[in-house]
Image (cartoon, rainbow, N blue to C red):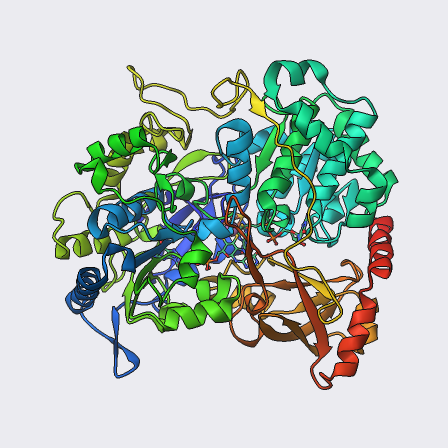
């Protein structure tokens, strides 16, 4: 075992903070500052600092489990793997390859995501694979691809942020979701730049803003169109840039002009003077940026909404120019790379399309198979989960915990239970693993090497720093063993570097070209931005900044999209008069499978809560800490009230990190965006009740509390208080 410090990266979010790991004599692992990584310069949030706690055998799995007489019992690796292989073989023989489902995750390394996609298509021959990234940034990815011909979360490094003139941050609570990145916004302000935050809640991030707009959830599309209308009306369009570098302005302009500021105020609750102020802040400096996160994206119109924000950037000449641009703050550790290398339903490695004959030919050649043997595109994540137990009869799941994190989770849980066979690879016994027929315990970030691609598009090397405990194997070993048992003996190496070497070849010539990147280079340089083609010399420097000369479209021009506002899939009514939105708190990560096993994090964030405005609380008769029930058409969740003036009175907020009674996703609406197939996590209609007297009288009162006029005025009060 190594005793010196190994430089690596955090297992959690897309910031991929650098850290050093040192094994201690008592078997634990120490985290220390790694100042050379420019993104976090040594700083870590509580989750990153405490990540080694999950390496402990006290909380993790160290033996495969198989279901016997209804309960999970320890088994040998051979028994567990044989059982999975036998079920996959039988079901495929009886019902065809598409009866086998595969579900991946954006936390998996590039190597794992690549191998999982290849396993599904080459070994199983199934089209039915997708992953949790569909729940994350798929709307921004779709909009970026439409407008720019390429989707890379940020087209510039984070270090550009402090040097621009204005940042509009739409639906990101960076201060809690990527704490070390808050520094870039603080520096922006120190340099004289301005920060506009758009969030229905006055978050820790919004508190930093020069201007906080608090729209009604689900109305960002109208808001962006209203700003564009004002840009036109105030003569702030960069006509020269529009003529030289874009197409489609006439139609997009016409669509925006239908969104009068007063109309937008009525929809969003944001007063017209505030809209004008935002336009002024955005347009006056020489350079400016729009950054979106899950707030505007996790909507059934997320793709159009991001498109509208991109339109604003294009009309004002703020894309593909130094220190200007649109970017999406991708979420998971490998949220970016995880969407590039083939675990997505419609995709082949290198961000290639499964429907493109040339892409199929190229990848099939690397894989040594006939292009015609590759299946076509499958279903999106929610549609796949919804089909479990019908035409999909078995599921292999790696890197997600949908029992907690999927929309309409009670239904998804029921679908998982209805499967003939469920196999889960995880590091802990997650709520989803608890339902499995076989659970395989896998190695973790600190125990294996692999690459991730951060939200900046920077490919990074995570290095093995410690020896895994007995009893666990890596995801790559699992795939190799299963491939072997299913009769594919070659093409699934367990060594991550070997997988990466193949990924390089498979990605060569694709949009996300990694062919010029190697483990050696990553170790030496600390990270390389894609695209990085191998070229003839193999010394391509990588591409920190995209689109400066041309966009990645055929004609090199960015494309405006003509979009119009539309309501959320589910708007409040008499029965469900309040809006529910959901999101995160700083001390827990995602479904909580990992962070709920860390004492320090549980002490900081012990359980779910319902954030509500004092006026709504008063009408319900709920006091701070009282249990309240939130009821939607999908179900009912109960959690303590947290009363704050920092939320609109027509809206309640719940974090989604917990299972059980307080599970936010019991309530959420699986309405999908037509392009990205992203579910509407950020808006649904609910009724809020006190638990002791959950009678109809209360429900009716809650109805009054959220009548439109009242709510919008109150929303403005939140804004005015800023
Ligand atoms: N602590 C912590 N950090 C994380 C994660 C975690 O689970 N915990 N997860 C990681 C991942 S995978 C992701 S995707 C990112 C997510 O990072 P963020 O997008 O910052 O996180 P969220 O809390 O989901 O949503 C951000 C904000 O959107 C606001 N919002 C809600 N509805 C709307 C709306 O209709 N419009 C607008 N404009 N805003 C709205 C919410 O009030 C919330 O403050 O975080 C990453 N980092
Ligand atoms: N209501 C609501 N729901 C949401 C969201 C929201 O804002 N609101 N956000 C959505 C978003 S953006 C996301 S990204 C999803 C995330 O939700 P999930 O997909 O559930 O993500 P995690 O909780 O990170 O689950 C990862 C699982 O994989 C395990 N794991 C970690 N590393 C590895 C590994 O290397 N190999 C294997 N085999 N397993 C591993 C972990 O222990 C954990 O059980 O939730 C979505 N759900
Ligand atoms: S901000 Fe994200 S990457 Fe950095 S330490 Fe926290 S969880 Fe890890
Ligand atoms: Mo995410």
* Total marks placed: 0
Q: Quadrant of residue 101?
A: bottom left
Foreground of the two, 538 or 581: 581
In the rendered view, would you say 214 is above or below 637? above
Residue 442 at least partly seen: no
Left-right relation of 418 to 556: left
In the rendered view, would you say 53 is above or below 161? below
Foreground of the two, 206 or 381: 381
In the rendered view, would you say 640 is above or below 517? below
In the rendered view, would you say 501 is above or below 490? above
Q: Position of residue 597 (x, y in %)?
A: 46, 67
Residue 300 at least partly seen: yes
Left-right relation of 478 to 188: left
Q: Quadrant of residue 53?
A: bottom left
- For image coordinates 80% across by 65% down, the residue present is 706
Q: Position of residue 461 (x, y in %)?
A: 36, 39
Foreground of the two, 247 or 530: 247
- For image coordinates 60% across by 74% down, the residue present is 637
Foreground of the two, 602 or 348: 348
Q: Position of residue 690 (x, y in %)?
A: 73, 80
Q: Position of residue 535 (x, y in %)?
A: 31, 18
């Amino acid at each position: 075992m190594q005793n010196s410090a190994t430089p690596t990266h955090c297992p959690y979010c897309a910031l991929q903070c650098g850290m050093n790991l040192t094994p201690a004599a008592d078997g634990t692992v120490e985290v220390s500052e790694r100042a050379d990584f420019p993104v976090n310069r040594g700083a870590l949030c509580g989750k990153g600092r405490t990540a080694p706690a999950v390496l402990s055998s006290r909380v993790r799995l160290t033996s495969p489990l198989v279901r016997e007489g209804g309960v999970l019992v320890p088994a040998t690796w051979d028994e567990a793997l044989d059982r999975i292989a036998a079920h996959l073989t039988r079901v495929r023989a009886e019902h065809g390859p598409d009866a086998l489902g595969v579900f991946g995750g954006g936390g998996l390394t590039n190597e794992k995501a690549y191998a999982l996609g290849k396993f599904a298509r080459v070994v199983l021959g199934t089209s039915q694979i997708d992953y949790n990234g569909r729940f994350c940034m798929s709307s921004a990815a779709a909009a970026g691809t439409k407008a720019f011909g390429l989707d890379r979360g940020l087209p510039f490094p984070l270090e550009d942020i402090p040097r621009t003139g204005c940042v509009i941050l739409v639906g990101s609570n960076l201060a809690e979701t990527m704490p070390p990145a808050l520094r870039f916004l603080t520096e922006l302000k120190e340099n004289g730049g301005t920060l506009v935050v758009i969030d229905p809640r006055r978050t820790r991030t919004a508190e930093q803003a020069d201007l906080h707009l608090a729209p009604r959830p689900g109305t960002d599309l109208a808001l962006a169109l209203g700003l564009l209308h004002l840009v036109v009306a105030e003569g702030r369009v960069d006509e020269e840039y529009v003529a030289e570098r874009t197409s489609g302005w006439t139609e997009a302009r016409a669509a925006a002009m239908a969104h009068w500021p007063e109309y937008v105020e009525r929809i969003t609750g944001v007063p017209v003077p505030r809209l004008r102020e935002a336009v002024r802040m955005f347009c006056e400096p020489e350079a400016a940026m729009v950054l979106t996160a899950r707030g505007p994206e996790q909507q059934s119109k997320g793709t159009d909404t991001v498109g509208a924000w991109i339109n604003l950037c294009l009309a004002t000449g703020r894309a593909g120019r130094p220190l200007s641009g649109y970017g999406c703050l991708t979420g998971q550790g490998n949220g970016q790379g995880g969407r590039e290398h083939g675990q997505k339903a419609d995709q082949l490695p290198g961000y290639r399309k499964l429907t493109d004959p040339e892409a199929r030919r190229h990848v099939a050649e690397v894989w040594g198979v006939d292009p015609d043997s590759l299946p076509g595109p499958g279903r999106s994540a929610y549609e796949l989960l919804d089909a479990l137990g019908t035409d999909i009869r078995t599921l292999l799941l790696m890197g997600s915990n949908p029992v907690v994190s999927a929309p309409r989770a009670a239904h998804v849980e029921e679908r998982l239970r209805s499967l003939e066979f469920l196999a889960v690879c995880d590091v802990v016994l997650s709520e989803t693993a608890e339902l499995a027929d076989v659970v395989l315990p896998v190695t973790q970030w600190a125990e294996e090497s692999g690459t991730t691609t951060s939200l900046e598009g920077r490919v990074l090397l995570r290095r093995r720093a410690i020896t895994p405990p007995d009893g666990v194997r890596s995801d790559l070993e699992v795939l190799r063993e299963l491939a072997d048992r299913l009769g594919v003996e070659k093409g699934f190496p367990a060594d991550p570097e070997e997988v990466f070497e193949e990924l390089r070849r498979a990605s060569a010539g694709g949009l996300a070209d990694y062919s010029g990147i190697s483990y050696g280079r990553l170790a030496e340089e600390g990270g390389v931005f894609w695209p990085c083609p191998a070229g003839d010399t193999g010394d391509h420097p990588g591409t920190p900044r995209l689109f400066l000369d041309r966009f990645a479209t055929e004609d090199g021009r960015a494309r405006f999209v003509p979009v119009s506002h539309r309501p959320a899939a589910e708007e409040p009514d008499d029965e469900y008069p309040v809006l529910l939105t959901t999101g995160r708190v700083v001390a827990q990560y995602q479904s909580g499978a990992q962070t709920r096993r860390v004492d320090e994090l549980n002490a900081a964030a012990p359980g779910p809560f319902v954030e509500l405005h004092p006026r709504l609380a008063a009408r319900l008769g709920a006091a701070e800490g009282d249990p309240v029930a939130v009821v939607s058409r999908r179900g009912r969740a109960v959690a303590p009230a947290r009363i704050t003036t920092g939320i609109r009175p027509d809206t309640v907020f719940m974090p989604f990190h917990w299972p059980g009674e307080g599970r936010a996703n019991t309530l959420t609406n699986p309405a999908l965006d037509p392009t990205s197939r992203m579910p509407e996590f950020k808006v649904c209609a609910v009724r809020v009740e006190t638990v002791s007297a959950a009678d109809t009288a209360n429900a009716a009162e809650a109805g009054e509390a959220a009548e439109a006029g009242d709510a919008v005025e109150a929303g403005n009060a939140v804004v005015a208080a800023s």
